[in-house]
Image (cartoon, coloured by chain):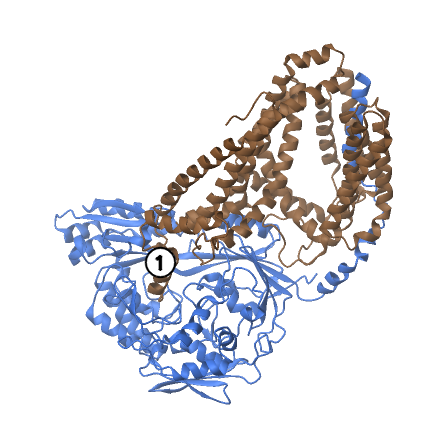
Amino acid sequence: MLTYITRRVLASLLILLGASFIVYMLVAYSGDPLAEIKSSNSPSKEARIAQRTEALHLDVPPALRYFIWLGGAVKCVVPFVGQCDLGVTLQNQPVTVALSTAIPTTLQLVTTAAVLAITIGISIGIVTALRQYSTLDYGVTFVTFLFFSLPIFWVAVLLKEFGAIKFNTFLYDPYIKNSTILLISLVMGLLWAVLLSGSWKRRGITFVSAFAVTAGVLYFLSVTRWFSEPSLGIVVILVTGVAIAFGSTVLFAGLRNRRALYSSLIMVGLGGVAYYALQPLWDRATLWLVIGLGILAIVAGWLVGRFMGGYDHQQSSRAAMLTSFGVSGLVLLDQFMKNWSRYASDPHIRQRPIATIGAETPGLNGDFWLTGIDKYTHLVLPTIALILISLASYTRYSRASMLEVMGQDYVRTGRAKGLSERVVVTRHAFRNALIPLATIVAIDIGALIGGAVITESVFSFKGMGVLFLNGVRDHSPNPVMGVFLVTGITAVVFNLIADLAYSALDPRVRVKA
Amino acid sequence: MKIRRLSAGVAVIAAGALVLTACSNEPSDNASASPSASSSGAASTTGGTVTVSETNEFFSFNPSTANGNTDINSKISLATNSHLYYIDDQLKVQHDDSFAKTEKLSDDPLTVKYTINEGKKWSDGEPIDANDLVLAWAVFSGYYDDAKTDDSGEVVSGASYFSYAGSTLGLGLTDFPEIGDDGRSITLKYSKPFSDWEVALDLDRPAHVVAKNAGLADAAALTDLLKNTPRGNPDKPAKNDALKKVADFYNTGFDSKTLPSDPELYLSSGPYIVSDVQEGQSVTLVPNKTYDGDQTPKLDSIVMRTIADPSAAITALKNGEVDVVSPQANADTLAALEGVPGVQVHQGLQLAFDHIDLNSTGVFKDKNVREAFLKTIPRQAILDAIITPLDPKATVLNSVLFVPAQPGYAKTIETNGFKDFVEPDIAGAKELLGGKTPTVKLLYNINNPNRVDAYTLIAKSAKEAGFKIVDEGDVDWGSRLGDGSYDASIFGWINSGVGVSGVPQIYGTGQSSNFNKMSDKAADAQMSELIQTIDPAAQEDLQVQIEQKIGATFTTLPFFQSVGVDAVADRVKGIDTYNPNQNGVWWNTWEWTVDDAS
């Protein structure tokens, strides 16, 4: 095992070295970083040329300049040698400093999108696999491929126009027209009818009830001007919580396991108590307090499941933990919603909350709630854009993988020995279907660090993608190499992790030195 | 099992629907009861915020250095400093009498006195006085430089101390200034008259901060050091470590992409002061509490946001996230701006203009060939293809030294001969060529659609007269300028709008930006006279004469002025016209207000 890892790391180092040389040469020969100064009539032309030549070692031929860069870069990898030196950008800023602000920005942008795309994509993939060749399957395939083939800058423009500009204008007077309500309700009714397949009679009932519920809810939201002053309130939290409790029990234990159901319901009750108990704390909320409370909620769920006892107390714990997590999420969401109108009326926002550019509103000095909402209003559009584009691949991979597993002999054996379909799917099929996905996800994460170049430019995020792009545009190798180093190393590391994870997950695969 | 699936489905529907439901039993004033709401409520009663979208990233509080001299650094500096002069949107030099007095004491020898009004202070409370002006003078004059450089620009002996972005030509003619009025004034005596004396000196970075960071006791110690150091002599370079330390700090110490932890590095002497910098994203300005001049700030804050993508900037304007955008003008951006409701679009002519340069060597050594080539250029067609769609009233530009807005333009076009080349004269060109078919290598920026259009039209027309055109369209056109690998080049210049000392740099024999190596002895003499002429009317006459000589060499031909545009949300008042110079909308930040202080 150790020999294997050592060998892999050494091979990767050589590849990185070779690739870095090629990338450096490509950028260095792509153009002259002095061109912009040379063509100007600035009186200090000579001084600027001399200064840039010295800062970027332009008097040294590129092949040798690479080794100057390498000499500095090696110090980053080898410990105790000295300061990390990746050269400077055209503005005389050390690349290490530029990276230290670009990496967090990129992570902030892509993490949520990646997590959501993976979760949603895999869920859709599994569901479509279980309903192979149904209307749902075809519908989802069509939609995901449609999004997959849309260019992201165009999606971004549409999102900005409808998700931000039109939506913000709607928020001035959040009244929904009856015709709009009718249309949305029709679509929702059809959607649910397709989603819950079955006999025509059942589909009809689904359609009518979904239509009625949506129309009712939308009408209520419209007349109460809910969008200007949104909130959930204890009743919605409790009712939704009970629904989550049932859902998670079905997922983890089956409704016949009453202990699991009761543990989940207890968590909903506790969530209701916490809703009132925590109110005085919210004014002084910080990020760490909220994370701490979230962990506390999960631990509480585990404990409740444990105390409910029984031979399968783990199932109860899991159901209770998921429920508890969901309910605390609702309580938090409710609190954010209550701060919404305060955010929207801030002089920096001026009643136009959804943003089209940047990661935050400059100059907005708010507490945890305001800055949290500010992050949300800035991230929501780019995140949606990124999710829409990357949904298709996850859906297709997980669908294929699930279909393959469902056709395996052990699944048939499981069914033959009388296991319920729920157990067959969640216990036997689902877990094994995830194994090949581990590789894809690990490699995707490596690629994500490199930044979403187009998304970053369109939404004006100053992340890795923009750093890379500016470097290429200015013919300046240093920032490009900085981005290359970070992405290259992450790609190598995550590939290794993927291979090791594969062997850990699938006993048939063994790492041999 | 069927029943359970149905019930699970119902549970999911219920969950999905109820998340959206509004059981808002909560009292709605709950939110405003929290403590931080009151502070934002108080802020809303004052001047409001204006957000300006800019293309470039801010990275230095010192735009006077060669490295820091970019448009956006200058704009931020403009709003956060008091100035000995500033340039308004009509390209007139203006003085802020509430800050300082500029007096020309005599014409011969040219003597100028700058007096800072009593009681002026930096934002840390230190006085603004002669020490600050002496530091600015030391930087802008290049007085102490004793470096010798070889042909490649490498320093072979001595040292260049302060890295100054502007020309040291003018203040280089002065000796160490005389300090007076209790240390509030300096008087400069020029050894020769200098044309641009009015825009030669400005208040720069605080001397006490530079002194402290260079290891000196105070601003007076810095002035003493400068006073006791003689003028740099490249033939006898003297090592001066103390001055070197001062210069090193001045050159790089104010560069920062974020808000420095030391507030002395971003002191303000003007109406606004920087309060926050988000690297590569935004700079926030708030009123400077110690400012007591006439340019009183009226806003709560000005936010500069960097948005590189012009369409993203226009969308942000539409969404109310930014109030002012100044995108590059082309058919797309103009159409997009037309579609934004509630904004005022200002369109104008920029100081930048496109032109063609003919080398006076190689195939163009013969003046008749140059003239023949210029005769083939369809300038009206180029204008119609590139500028007319943006500005139907635009006309062909007929001067390289004046823009039509300046008074000298009408006079110079009568004599410089450029107006004879509006429509192509193929027959005349053929006659001049006398049957020859010269091959012309034409260089232009292949990434700029305007230059590609101009090239295509020129190439087509020149071929009719018998020229053979070689397409030298190149991404790297900038570094090829002046290297002799082409015969003609299409590119742009930016007219400074104010001052004349930039003229010899482009048209003087052997000067650094004279890429086509044009040379006219009589013009050279007049250009050196020009930069020593103080009287504006005399300057204009000289420029007209110089341009006549430039025109007679047939080495250059202007095409058109670029169109500039900015768009301002209706709620913002105080930005009324398009400002053609590089400061854009930022020249009068103190006059900005917002209408809806809510």
State the residue at coordinates (16%, 50%): B430
Q: Residue furthest bottom?
A: B181
- Colour applied to chain B: blue
Classify mark 1: helix, strand or loop.
helix
| Residue A362 position (above or below residue A376) | below
Q: Nearer the viewer, residue B158 or B511?
A: B158
Q: Quadrant of residue B194?
A: bottom left
Where does residue A217 sit, x and y in percent of width and height?
79, 36
User: Dividing the image into 4 quarters, which one contains the C terminus of chain B?
Assistant: bottom right
Q: Is residue B175 left or right of residue B527?
A: right
Circle 1 is placed at which residue position? A53
Q: How many marks?
A: 1
Q: Nearer the viewer, residue A95 or B79?
A: A95
Q: Nearer the viewer, residue A501 or B493?
A: A501
Residue type at numbered disc 1: Thr
Give the residue at x 76% y 59%: B37
